[in-house]
Image (tube, rainbow, N blue to C red):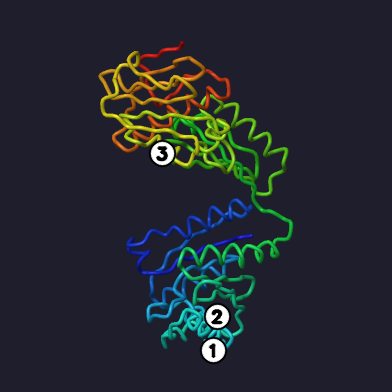
Amino acid sequence: MRIEIISTGDEIVTGLVVDTNAAWLSALLLEQGWQVRRRLTVGDNLADLKTVLQESASRAEVVLVCGGLGPTADDLTAQAAAEAFEQPLTLFPDWLATITARYASRGRPMAQSNAKQAWLPQGCEILDNPVGTACGFVVRSGQSQLFFTPGVPFEFKQMVSEQILPRLKQLTGAQIDTELRRFYTFGVSESALSDMLDAEPWPSGIELGYRSSMPLIELKLIGHGASTEDMDAAEARLLATTESWLVGRGDIEPAQQILTLLEENPLALYECESRGTLLAICHEYAALEASFSSTLSSELAQLTGSTHGVSLTIGRAGQDGVPLLLCADGKRIGQTVKVSHPDPESRRKILAFAALDMLRRHLLGEPILGDYLTLARTSQHDG
């Protein structure tokens, strides 16, 4: 099933608002087994809107359109749909009554401009909006179904989850076009991974995608109608190559996976050079104690940690780099690393996850100090 997304609004085109709706929707659909083929953005211009709607409808079985359903003069999506597919705007009295009742329940009079939100393309199917005044609707054109939603993120996400996803599942039945398997690596660059993983083609119907999300590289095995056997073989090949740097897999963020391994045992964090970045990653963990000090040592041998439970310490930067210390089970295991990245925030994220990876390795019974390609280790202590 070919799916396209259209985001509308001058505020998105000009960059005044970041289009988080389209990113969220694309990821959600991929998790369900549908990969979006195109994403388009168009401003509040009637002619441009009509053209984009017609072009997408000519290519895709499903078009998801977000935004432009408000009561103001620049909200033109419903009019554009009506003109693009020759379904004149028509008053839907039931939705007008819903808007009126919603205002009455809040003790407020309805503005006259809100009545515009009850004028929709003739013959469309209304999609209920339980929290806002802009309903969604579905327009059919040839082999295409176009789903229109408001752009307010809370309303949009609820409508997608409750109104649109069930309809898409009915369209495809039990058949899933795409299977997605996700893996996360740390300590290796995207280009190095590409050199190792793309030297030979993947089986027919399977592709490998990359996403850099500092400080991790996410690898996505995407199967388009591929057999389970082929997907399993592709996964085995990927794991054999990336085992040294693999820090998580699946839909849960690696940091959360690592903290789950602690099984609610106490964790103490002491930070200097990372300036609270490690705390930001771990802040939702319940059994957490954290502190920041600018006076922590730059010498690994002089760092201290918790005398009970598990602790991670990130010291101050020195000539040899930044010392990282894990204290657990009465042992002190540490390393001093140099991070060569021009962005200070990215350097802090790398340091924080390097410490967290020491914890992961400890909890899984692996060697505490990993062999990274993007970090230079200048000293280490194991004892």
Counting from the top left corner in percent of width and height, residue 135 is at 53, 76
Q: Amino acid at mark 2?
A: Phe
Q: Element type at marker 1?
A: strand
Q: Which mark is residue 57?
A: none
Are the residues at dot 2 and dot 1 in contact (C-beta closer than 8 Å)? no
> With 180 as the anchor, is 281 left or right in this view?
left
The residue where tag 2 is placed is 85
Residue 227 image-quadrant placement: top right
Location of the N terminus (image quadrant)? bottom right
> With 234 as the anchor, is 310 left or right in this view?
left
The tag earlier along the polypeptide, 2 or 1, is: 2
Are the residues at dot 3 and dot 1 in contact (C-beta closer than 8 Å)? no
Q: Amino acid at mark 1?
A: Leu
The residue where tag 3 is placed is 214
Q: Residues within 10 Å of mark 2 (few under 14, many from 20)?
A: some
What is the C-alpha distance between the residues marked 2 and 1?
17 Å
User: Front-most of 296 and 73?
Assistant: 296
What is the C-alpha distance between the residues marked 3 and 1?
50 Å
**Residue at 63% from the left image edge and 34% from the top image edge:** 235
The residue where tag 1 is placed is 91
Q: Element type at marker 2?
A: loop
Residue 136 image-quadrant placement: bottom right
Q: Nearer the viewer, mark 2 or mark 3?
A: 3
Counting from the top left corner in percent of width and height, residue 177 is at 66, 53
Q: Amino acid at mark 3?
A: Met
Note whether 39 is above or below 187 in the view shown: below
User: Front-most of 169 and 194?
Assistant: 169
For the view shown, which residue lies furthest in the front direction?
Answer: 308
Counting from the top left corner in percent of width and height, residue 125 is at 62, 78
Q: Residues within 10 Å of mark 3 (few under 14, many from 20)?
A: some
Q: Residues within 10 Å of mark 1 (few under 14, many from 20)?
A: some
Residue 108 image-quadrant placement: bottom left
